[in-house]
Image (tube, helix red, strand yellow):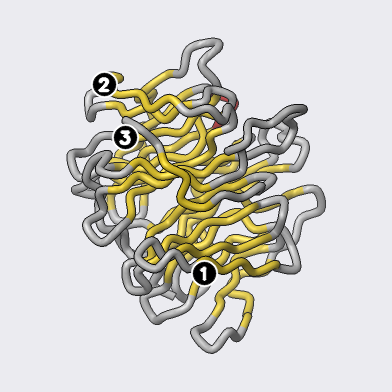
Amino acid sequence: MTYEIAVRAEAALGEGPTWDAAGGRLLWIDILGARLHTYDPASGRRTARTLDQHIGAVKPRAAGGLVLNLRDGVALLDPDDTFRWLHHEPVPGRRANDAAVAPDGSLWAGTMRYDEAPGGGSLSRIGGDGSVDVVLDDVAVSNGTGWSPDGRLMYYVDSPTRRVDVFDHDDGRIGNRRPFAGIEDGAGFPDGLTVDADGCVWVALWDGGAVRRYTPAGELDRVITLPAPRVTACAFGGPDLTDLYITTARVGLAAPHPVAGSLLVVPGAGKGLEQPSFAG
């Protein structure tokens, strides 16, 4: 499979590609640049908005607008551009990281410490009414989260573990955590992930220069090799959800590859799942 450059950029820490079906556009972010990007593949139109603090994730809302996982909590951006906090909980030394919307419309929002200290991060379930349930409280770098097509399994990455784990999922509750796929030494660290319509799990490899696909049985069956070593996340987009969008980073690289920090795309890579919007 051959990648293309969707948006040439120099994001310090490009992350979180998300297809906004209602807007016909891809949302993605630069965490450390505190920038929210949009890209319309039909017209080529791009936008970039600088925020007041680091952002870990952005997702569409069912009511219109966006939900933002920010350094100091979870906020809503209304269609008229009004900003308001849904859950405000600043913690010194901690920031937001990846997030995902569950089948029931709740936001599962991850955090981590800037120094990546073990146990310094968490994964919380945020309801549309602003209710908060801490699901995991002993996390280092909370990263990729996704659900099987039937919603009965949840996949999750705490990057330093070098594993993708899987939980049983039922009505917003998870249990029976077990390893799903391990990343061998020298192949990088698992970062963001997405689940396709066949139930396969695609995971980006930080310092691995690749995206891997694992079958529902946890078997590696496909590898997309990329020139940028710090591959951060992936998601299906486009009107038919067949194009795999991939974010990359250039932070910490002495001589970054020219595409590092850009948004990449692999046309026709597979078939994605339609993603729910946040219920808030």
Rounded to the nearest whole Å, what is the CA distance between mark 1 and mark 2?
34 Å
* Residue 193 locus on image (x, y percent): 42, 39
Q: Nearer the viewer, residue 146 or 8?
A: 8
Amino acid type of the residue that numbered disc 2 sits on in the rendered structure: Asp
At horizontal 43% and vertical 18% (from top left) the residue drawn is 182
Above or below residue 220? Residue 104 is below
Where is the N terminus found, in terms of image quarters? top left
Regarding residue 98, the answer to whether it shows in the image is no
The residue indicated by pointer 1 is 67
Residue at the image point whose x is 38% and y is 27% from the top = 224
Q: Residues within 10 Å of mark 3 (few under 14, many from 20)?
A: many
Residue 190 rendering spot, x and y as whole percentages: 50, 29
* Residue that protrudes farthest toward the top in the picture: 185
Tell me the SS state at disc 3.
strand
Q: Which mark is residue 201?
A: 3
User: Mark 3 or mark 1, which is nearer the start of the sequence?
Assistant: 1
Label 1 or label 2, whichever lies nearer to me, is 2
Residue 17 tag number: none
Q: Which residue is mark 2?
A: 221
Give the structural element (helix, strand or loop) at label 2.
strand
Question: At 63% from the left edge and 31% from the top edge, which residue is drawn?
Answer: 257
Instruction: Say which amino acid is labelled 1.
Output: Val
- Mark 1 vs 3: CB contact within 8 A: no
Q: Residues within 10 Å of mark 2 (few under 14, many from 20)?
A: few
Q: Secondary structure at mark 1?
A: strand
Distance (Cα) linking label 2 and label 3: 10 Å
Closer to the chain start, of discs 1 and 2, is: 1
Q: Nearer the viewer, mark 2 or mark 3?
A: 2
State yes or no: discs 2 and 3 in contact (Cβ < 8 Å): no
Q: Position of residue 112 (x, y in %)?
A: 66, 43
Q: At which x and y percent is residue 174?
A: 37, 44
The amino acid type, in three-letter code, at marker 3 is Val
